[in-house]
Image: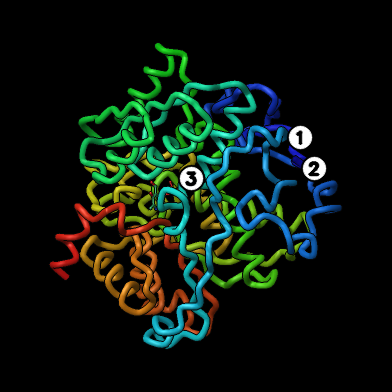
Amino acid sequence: MKSQITHLECTLCGKNYSHRKPMRLCPDDQKPLYARYDLQKAAETLTPESLSGRASNMWRYEEVMPVEKSESVITLGEGFTPLFKAERLGSSLGMDELFIKDEGVNPTGSFKARGLSAAVSMAHQLGEMKLTMPSAGNAAGAMSAYAAKAGMEAHVFMPEDAPEANQIECVAYGAQLNLVKGFITDAGKLSAEAAEEHGLFDVSTLREPYRPEGKKTMGYEIVEQLNFEVPDVIVYPTGGGTGIVGIWKALDEMEALGWIGSERPRMICVQAEGCAPIVTAYRKGEEFADPFPNPQTLAAGMRVPAAVGDFLVLRAVRESGGTAVTVDDKTMVASVKKMAAHEGIFAAPEGGATLSALEQSLESGEVGRDERVVLLNTGSALKYLDVLGPALADV
Ligand SMILES: Cc1ncc(COP(=O)(O)O)c(C=O)c1O
């Protein structure tokens, strides 16, 4: 691999650590670590022209991926998903330049495949062969699949009301499934205890450094697919926040690589009305978010009441000049139907939420109808049929 990784850096205190040993949070302040690269060196070979002919998956950006040993790349073909121009939906909204990046076509049906391919690959390189994680559902399915491919042991902890498809797929992939009474935060505590007790490596989102490295490739792809131009707005459904901060990190890296200038999209963070810790902190002007009490939404991926990377999401939204908005479940489900009927994309409720947020932002004037907007459909509705089926019949 041509990885130009140099070290890990704490996102809060800036302290550096080696990437050659297993790390989770910064030992000093318990905040996320980011992988850093020699981007000047990477720019010598990772040029826009160099991309034609490379693998049509996220590993095409290998210079800015963390894995150094090619035998440790655990891949199921994740990434390089289509960026569709949403002509019919766009015209119904009076927009000429509306795009949908469809992450539902990833292995295991969601963008979680990217983060887990990167994290499982790094675990493999570092010799960690027993993994555990808490998950709202999709991440557990993805980890279980990549662990199966790598021949690793996988333990997953998910709320007992997580979508049925996620529970079934984990078992099929050979993972040990633990259903938890409570929320993902409760699952997180149990996963951490299991890690301690049984010597498992915990790959909770942003509590290990490499899931954002997989997710950042969504940002690389959007820019590559728009011919090395940056859209005006990116709308992202936010739970733990790794997707939105990954895209933000990619934009900085692409500027250092000379692919783009200092221009940035406005990042719109969407959360569910029933679980909106980041939006609440954004509105109050706070740097960190308080845990959201009694989180409720059928969009399981956004049912995340507290996130260790809260300040990174808030930073990205504010620095980009974007905003943070909530949508209610009914509107989200109506948007799933609208996206499906106009574009042939059967989106996860989280993906539907991005369309609801766009409509709200067009209405408020936050987004202009002449702007180039990218909606991230982060997953496939087929993973949610047990909860989405009845809800769809209701809108
Ligand atoms: C389909 C879907 N969309 C969005 C999210 C939220 O992603 P993130 O944790 O990167 O904010 C999740 C997380 O589980 C998800 O499964």
Question: What residue sits 43% from the left and 82% below the top?
Answer: 90
Q: Which residue is mark 3?
A: 287
How much space separates mark 2 and mark 1, taking CA atoms? 6 Å
Q: Is residue 204 above or below residue 98?
A: above
Q: Is residue 94 left or right of residue 4?
A: left
Task: Work out which quarter of the rendered image holds the N terminus and state it.
Answer: top right
Q: Give, as a three-letter code, the residue at label 3.
A: Glu
Residue 228: percent from left, percent from top? 70, 69
Q: What numbered label is drawn on residue 169?
A: none
Q: Which residue is mark 1?
A: 6
Q: Is residue 382 left or right of residue 113?
A: left
Q: Which residue is mark 2?
A: 38
Q: Is residue 385 visible?
A: yes
Q: Nearer the viewer, mark 1 or mark 3?
A: 1
Judge the density around disc 3: few (<14), some (14-19), many (≥20) Cα neighbours within 10 Å.
some
Q: Is residue 178 above or below residue 43?
A: above
